[in-house]
Amino acid sequence: MARIVVDVMLRKEIHDPQGEAIASAAHRLGFGQVLGVRQGKRFEVELSGPADEAALARVAELAGELLANQVIEEFTLHES
Amino acid sequence: MTARVGVITFPGSLDDADAARAVARAGAEPVPLWHGDRDLRGLAAVILPGGFSYGDYLRCGAIARFAPVMGELVPAARAGLPVLGICNGFQILCEAHLLPGALTRNAGLRFIDRVVRVRIEDTRTPWTADYAQDQEISVVLKSGEGAYVADPATLARLAAAGQVVARYAGANPNGSVGDIAGVRNEAGNVVGLMPHPEHAIDALTGPGTDGLGFFTSVLRAMVDQ
């Protein structure tokens, strides 16, 4: 069994009010060196069979179609 | 024969009953559609109501997009069927790529539930023909992820083609880019709207009757055909 991790982040130009709220909470906690926070999502996809190139390509397809909305988000994947 | 307008119920839809009531108040016959249906039953128009389909899991509208009924709706919409998505329905239409852009978390992070003023800027759609150009209406906005976003090229294209159907007329309530409250597809038959016209069809239970025009418009569009 293979596990592939898909990280989904809002595109840079998309406003992230949740990340901003987290950054301002960090400042209130005394983490003054925090310049900014962007919040994303992590998916751990378990597969039958090996994490070969074909499997990665299928997960990329899944990420592009379902896990991320590419109008506002981008994704990266790697083996866990 | 009375015009028949479908209202889809997804697991987690909330405003399907009000949408059906608005259709009936306008003089058409509301027909319930279930998310598992694979047949649009020859309906003349379809409404995707508000709510929290599939618990807003993953992203608002992201799972509903793959419901069996959407397999029928998407090609029908591309072929010209009048479709209106309200709130969660708007989110579903964006996820299904029937409408450009996306809806994201409100700028203030709070869920907004209040009456807003909205200006109708495109009256050429089957859902807005009964309004006057730039008419301002009072409707309820109730959403946590109602901030419309699109890339600059898409926004320029929408503005040039007149595809922004409605904008917030007062202060921007949720951070929507360009104060956008609703958009349409290129052909004009698919409209998405963040506020709720179906809650504004009766002075007793809503802020007035300003929302009724969406439903009388589509009825007239069907009769004119």
Image (cartoon, coloured by chain):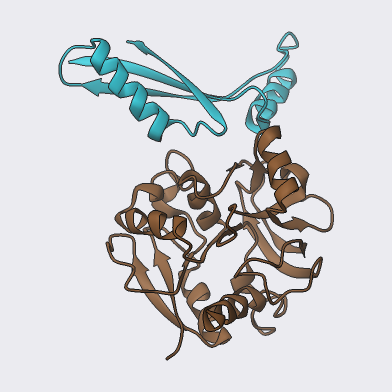
Q: Would residue B170 be found to the left or right of residue A26 on screen?
A: right
Image vertical order of residue A2 relative to residue B42, above or below: above
Q: Residue A27 appears at what percent x and percent y?
A: 74, 18
Q: Residue furthest bottom?
A: B1
Closer to the camera, B135 or A16? B135
Count all numbered tags in the image, as a single digit: 0
Side of A24 where B46 appears, left or right:
left
Compared with residue B196, is residue B109 higher up or lower down, i.e. above or below? Answer: above
Task: Name the one closer to the observer, A24 or A69.
Answer: A69
Residue A44 visible (yes or no): no
Query: Which residue appears at 47% of the width and 74% of the height?
Result: B17
Determine the residue located farthest toward the right in the rendered image. B170
Q: Residue placed at 43% from the left, 54% from the top?
A: B53
Residue in view at x 69 percent, y 46 percent:
B158
Chain in cyan in the render: A
Q: Which residue occupies the foreground of this view, B81 or B89?
A: B81
Residue B127 is situated, as x and y percent measured from the top left of the image, at: 61, 69
**Quadrant into which the N terminus of chain B falls:** bottom left
Tell me what hue chain B is rendered in. Answer: brown
Image spot of residue B111 (x, y percent): 64, 50
Is residue B103 toward the left or the right of residue B159 in the image?
A: left
Image position of B74 (left or right of A53) = right
Q: Would residue A10 be visible to someone looking at this image?
A: yes
Q: Quadrant of residue B217?
A: bottom right
Percent coordinates x, y for residue B221 in the rendering: 57, 77
- Viewer-closest of B64 and A29: B64
